Image (tube, rainbow, N blue to C red):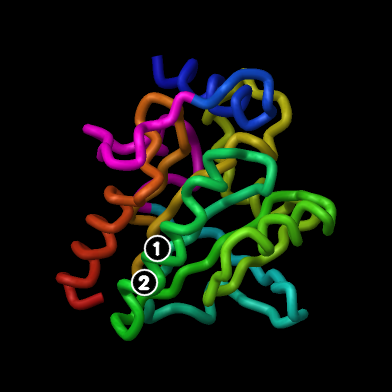
Amino acid sequence: MRRFALIALLVACGGAVAPVATPADDTPKEASIVVTEAMGSPHIGEAAPDFDLSDVNGGHVKLSSLRGSVVMLAFVTSWCPFSEAEQPNLQKLADDYRGKNVRVLAIDIKEPEVGYRKYLGRVPMAFPVLWDQTGDVVASFTPAHAQPDITDRSTVLVTSNLVIDPVGKIRFFTMGDTAHFDAKLVFARRTIDAVLAEGG
């Protein structure tokens, strides 16, 4: 059932059908598709792959340089309505956790510059939106057995969200789906709060 929900998400992101998203005022009863050990690496409980990507100003962010902080990481695109719906909530999350040792990063997945700049232009964001031009970073985060029917592996993690703890371990990792789309990032926030409560 969850596999079909993600396929529906990707079809919706491609514009073939209208998205079936959770209403903005309704929190889903469960998180989107949780990345499990059965899907392959990386998954919850493993170290997050390191990366070094540039932002719109040419500055670089290396994930391992953020050790000691909780990192909220979102994989996004300009063409997916679910990424668009989540976008203002990423900024709200960054605002709500400012000064609490939480860093927010978005990674635009393998788009041409016009798509990357379209994503940037929709909502003012006071956190780094990095550009994975080649798709190498998203590939390093895509578990081999997650949604194996999807041949373009760079699309598997469209509108996926991770929470990485201060030692670099993945504590939350979901792939979006139409049945349980959490635009407000409620479940990611719960994980962030739990990590912070542990002293993160």
Q: Nearer the viewer, residue 8 or 154?
A: 8
Check the image and name the residue furthest to the left.
197
Q: Tell me: 117 left or right of 197.
A: right
Q: CA distance from mark 1 to mark 2?
A: 6 Å
Reading the image, the residue beneath label 2 is 70
Mark 2: few/some/many CA within 10 Å (<14, 14-19, 20+):
many
Measured from the top left, where is residue 77 in percent x and y?
Answer: 65, 48
Reading the image, the residue beneath label 1 is 164
Measured from the top left, where is residue 24 in percent x and y?
Answer: 35, 41
Q: Nearer the viewer, residue 2 or 9?
A: 9
Secondary structure under tag 1 reads strand
What's the residue type where badge 2 is placed? Val
Most prominent secondary structure in the magenta stretch? loop
User: Relative to 112, is 169 above or below?
Assistant: below
Name which of mark 1 and mark 2 comes first in the sequence: 2
Residue at image x 63%, y 22%?
11
Q: Nearer the viewer, residue 54 or 63?
A: 54
| Magenta highlight range | 20-45
Residue at image x 35%, y 67%?
165
Residue at image x 28%, y 63%?
192
Can the viewer see residue 36 in this picture?
no
Can the viewer see residue 110 in this picture?
yes
Where on the picture, by quarter, is residue 52? bottom right
Mark 1: few/some/many CA within 10 Å (<14, 14-19, 20+):
many
